Image (cartoon, rainbow, N blue to C red):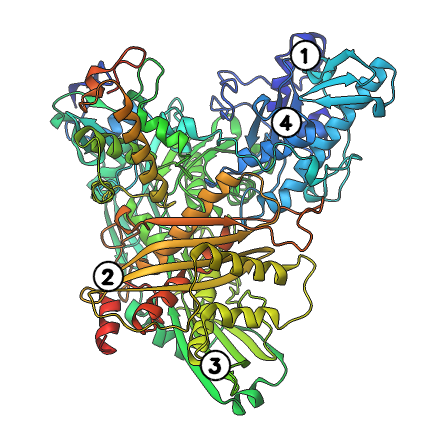
Amino acid sequence: MSRITLKVNGAPHTVDVEPLTPLLYVLRNDLGLQGPRFGCGLGQCGACAVIINGVATRSCVTPCANVRGEVVTLEGLASNGVLHPVQQAWIDEQVPQCGFCQNGQIIAAKVLLDKNPNPTEAQIREGMASTLCRCMTYYRVQLAIKRAARTIASLPSRSGEVAKAGRAGKAGWR
Amino acid sequence: MTTFTRVPHEIERWLETSDQLLSRRGFLKGSGLLVVSAGAAALTGPFAVDVGAQTAGRYPDPDFRQLDSWIVIHQNNTATFFVGKTDCGQGTGTAFRQMMSDELDIAYDKTTCVMGSTDVTVDQGGSGGSDAIQTDGWPMRRVAAEARRVLLDMASAKFAVPVAELAVSDALVTVKSDPTKKVTYGELIGGKRFNVTLTGNNVDATTGTAKVKGVQDLRIVGQSPQRYDIPAKVDGSLKWAVDVKLPGMVHARNVKPPVAGATLVGVDESSVRSLPGFIKIVSKGNYVAVVCEREEQAIAAAKQLKVQWQKPAASPFPTSDDLYAYMRSATPTSKQGPTVKGDPDAALAGAATVVEAEYDMPFQGHTAFAPAHALADPSNGQMTVYSNDMKSYGMRNGIAQFLGMPRDQVRVVWMEGPQGYGRTAADDAGFEAAYLAREIGRPVRVQWMRHEETAWDTKGPAFTFKLRGGLDAQGRLVALDYNAQAADYCHVGYNEADTVLIAQLMGRRRATPAAGSAGTPSDMYEIPNKRTGSQVVSLPLVWETPIRTGNLRDPNGPQITFAAESFIDELAAAAKVDPIEFRMRLLTAATTDDSGFKRARSIAVVKAAAEAYGWDSRPSPKKIESGTILTGRGIAYSYRNQTVVAEIAEVEVNRRTGHVWVKRLVCAHDCGLVINPEALRRTIECGMLHSLSRALHEEVRFDGEKPTGVDWITHPSLRHTDTPATIDVVLVNGDPNPKRPDLPHYGAGETICKPLIAAVANAIFDATGVRLRRVPFRDARVLEALKTARV
């Protein structure tokens, strides 16, 4: 066991675990987070996705000792009680069925829009291709991504740096 | 106050928090019947679940004949509904709230709904069979109507006016002649018991004396409030069954036989004893699990544990490539039918054209998005299981039987989980967690690994079909001969103590395996001469096998409808008649209908689908195009219970790669009275795509001793890249008297899954002239078929 410090959703946490412990189990069982979940343990489905340095990362295959940079989870996307536009689009579009995979869908969509605020249909489909859903909410996920893109484009900051820049009243989406 | 012991503790707690009930609380405490669970979280959210230290029990069955078991009115003029159903992701809780709010005359947003935990809600069986709205919605409506009646009686007494002179809206009762005289539900009864006894021989028949409203008087039903469960699923705040943590809990992982039918020879504990966090190996019969302090430790230990297995003497099953030949040569374990109408043999002998075809459907798995999981707490001599089991009541009974515990010392707390669709009706992990918790004496959380779930979950049975049809000289269908054969022997039931996997592995098996079933098509076609028959066959290995069948979303329906509706299309093509025109002739040939007007409604959905799609009437196949991409469209139709659907698929087939993209889907859907149209639309979209995954990708592959698909690469599923560009859903009310006040609400979900595979096959035929008679339509199989046909 060794002491490892992780910065998660803005706060530092020190845990005493084996260094090779996948980040997922630390987030869930030591830090009590519920957004990232176990789906396959193989990095194939996206249920465990978190954002590290702007990259959608599969926490089930990421040893916690290898984490460099802040970890942002589903719980960390909202700010000051305001949901990220992607999350709001998920509610407006009523995307989930069971919802178990939606952590991965939302994290992947958020990172996709951070990199490409105005994706084409083909870019959405390709960009989301390795994020799975067994209730098959894909059609609504894609509509929600387009809706979120419209919302983000309508905000004062259009640079795709919305997350960092924020704006009055809706500051600080990660 | 003679019946309060039968009202759930949870409801007692709701009432107990009322300031006005100090005297009653004192009475209850004095009687020793009030139990306040230490550390138990209050129900903070609209559907929060009590997760806390286990109470001392016991957990008697909530009495469905007590109105207080179903509805609590709070002093702040809000209401909580308690229903014995679970939600597999279709938003049924929202629908229940709509129906009950409407009957109670209270605003939807002033209500909450608690579902599916065995000590809290009456036993309505949990979920399954798309019966939540169709069957269980009725007692919910009746008890809410009864609560409204009782409240109006109370207001009548208070104001000394007849009920007829009262008006009620949004939980506020007013005297019509003097609107200054008004009282809220909360003022009338908030925090107090109704103490009203209901009647009914069973929970489905539960009723008071009040009548439910006519459709025209329903205000909330038919609207689309957003699903209340979605915000917490989007912001990460929902506590799922996988999230429950208890003091002192430990983690377990199973070690399954590497080969089907293997016998355990020995477990080498020394191979893991020194691992960090190791607690114990639990082994009985062929069941093996490792228990560790931390989750990742249990995963590592299960991987490292050295176990010696003895392979079975005989091969447990054929390879998946040999499956259909095996099934066709196997001796049936049971037969159903045949049911004969007219003289099909004579009609076939005299037919101008006879069409024959055989179809194959593979075993298909649930492959739930997350593997089976549960947490069991054995403290205080009770057993509480936190589970996403869709049939939580059955799990409670099964675990009590499995452990030899009295039922009222076992409870299952239902919480949200990955999609059910039948997998969690035969939920192995809850049994395993309970067994291990008793062995260890601490709360134990079990979760299967991906390879276990994909390989060992329950499977929808494989089918082979043989059909013959006869057309007369005018192209009319005069005879149909249908035979189906399902590999469904030893079908796993609902949470049975002698069929769940841990019981099988321990050797606790029932004497006679379940017979299983095959089944016949669900359509309203009028065919003068018809024979339908089916039989079940067994694989060589019956017990302890990963190729074990259970209920998969509309069990058998997608398989049967694939064959039946593909064959109707083949007959239409042979008759050179447009596929919709051919079906309409069969639907309109009859002159009688059933009590639910299913024939009229079948005609309505087929017409509605054709209209929504913009169907151009012509025979299939179309003239084969010259480019790389071939396009076509296909229709299929079916019903389940009283819900009828017609679905149209438009495909693009790449003749160079064999890749099929379903570019557009249309569904016309008639489930009677629609409770929440927007939620229904999404259920339809997703249900069609689930079947599309089964059509294009899904097949349980196995060699002679084990499944070979164990993850999302080796067992593929639909992806974002497969998603249609457009999905159109038409909600149809095809009832001959569409505005009748007693229009029923039928089960909406599973019917969606029936016709889709055939619609895709028919579209591929329309595009290419090639008939695919074996599922799935993976690229390689399609390409081979195209090459064989020189397309």
Circle 1 or circle 2, nearest the eye: 2
As measured in the structure, the alpha-carbon distance from the residue carrying label 1 to the one carrying label 2 is 68 Å
Query: Quick one: label 2, few (<14), some, or many (20+) residues within 10 Å?
Result: some
Q: Quick check: marks 2 and 4 in contact, CB under 8 Å?
A: no
Q: For mark 4, what is the residue?
A: B8
Give amino acid for label 2.
Answer: His
Viewer-closest of B219 and B617: B617
Mark 2 or 4 closer to N-term? 4
As measured in the structure, the alpha-carbon distance from the residue carrying label 2 to the one carrying label 3 is 30 Å
Query: Quick one: label 3, few (<14), some, or many (20+) residues within 10 Å?
Result: many
As measured in the structure, the alpha-carbon distance from the residue carrying label 3 to the one carrying label 4 is 57 Å
On screen, residue A47 versus residue A97, left or right, reads: left
Circle 1 or circle 3, nearest the eye: 3
Mark 2 or 3 closer to N-term? 3
Give amino acid for label 1.
Answer: Arg
- Extreme-bottom residue of the structure: B350
Mark 3 or 4 closer to N-term? 4
**Position in image of residue B282 (x %, y %):** 35, 41
Disc sitting over residue B659 in the figure: 2
Image quadrant containing the C terminus of chain B: bottom left
As measured in the structure, the alpha-carbon distance from the residue carrying label 4 to the one carrying label 1 is 15 Å
Viewer-closest of B121 and A85: A85
Mark 1 or 3 closer to N-term? 1
Q: Quadrant of residue B617?
A: bottom left
**Position in image of residue B145 (x %, y %):** 72, 32
Q: For mark 1, what is the residue?
A: B25
Q: For mark 3, what is the residue?
A: B468
Dot 1: what SS?
A: helix
Give amino acid for label 4.
Answer: Pro
